[in-house]
Image (cartoon, helix red, strand yellow):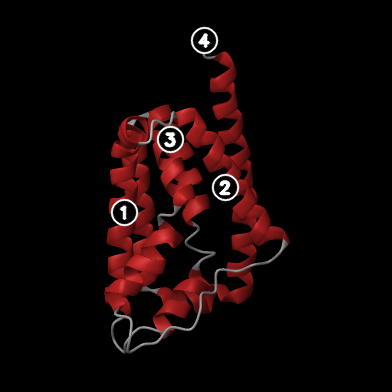
Amino acid sequence: MPYLEALVALFAIVDPIGNIPMFLHVADNVPEGQEAKAFNTAVLVGLTVLLVFAFAGKAILNHVFHIELAALQVAGGLLLIITAVDHLIFGILKKGVAINKSAVSATELGCVPLACPLLAGPGAMVTSLTMLEKHGPLAVIPAIVTIFLGLWLLLRFLEPVHRFLGDLVSTAFSKIMLVFISAIGVHMMITGLKAYFTTPS
């Protein structure tokens, strides 16, 4: 089903379970009592970014940067593969850096790094756009909304979910998702290259 394909692809890239350690890191570094504000901002901004890019991304690429979708698929697929290999093989985790609580507001942390690039980064943007081109808005919009609704629920109950899963399960799940991300990247590159070789010159 188109909806399930879009849902699985976006879930693998957004990786809410694997990003639990990063969510906890940000929660520890926001002003006291501002965790919910940071998380709500992250979900709202991330959802908005993906929806806007899914619908306006192609026009921006074609008319502003003069880039074809096939080129974006190849570049985005390569980016996903590099990201997956970097995290999977070399173990560079997205732990973030120490944050000065007095210098950064919950809203700022919700926007960066949570919303962008963690939740709505280049990989998620490219995937949203390519899935929209492939399956249409009736499959992609519900998939994006479902992912971020589930993410909002996860963040509401972050501590109990983390206690239930533990660091080991979260880390293992993240590694498994990286394998799927690399496979999605390969598929995107192949699709883009096919478009180049089959389009009449």
Residue 114 versus residue 11 in the image, above or below: below
Residue at 68% from the left image edge and 54% from the top image edge: 85
Asked if residue 160 can be seen in this view, the reply is no
Which amino acid is tagged 3?
A: Met
Judge by depth and name the residue closer to the eye, 64 or 21.
64
Q: How far apart are marks 2 and 4 (CA)?
A: 27 Å
**Neighbours of disc 4 within 10 Å: few (<14), some (14-19), many (20+):** few
Residue 185 versus residue 22 in the image, above or below: above
Residue 179 left/right relative to 138: right
Whichever of labels 2 and 3 marks the residue nearer the N terminus, that label is 2
Q: Mark 2 = which residue?
A: 79
Image mark for residue 130: none
Q: Mark 3 = which residue?
A: 131
Q: Mark 4 = which residue?
A: 200
Check whether the beta carbons of the residues at disc 2 and disc 1 lie within 8 A of each other.
no
Q: How far apart are marks 2 and 3 (CA)?
A: 17 Å
Judge by depth and name the residue closer to the eye, 72 or 27.
72
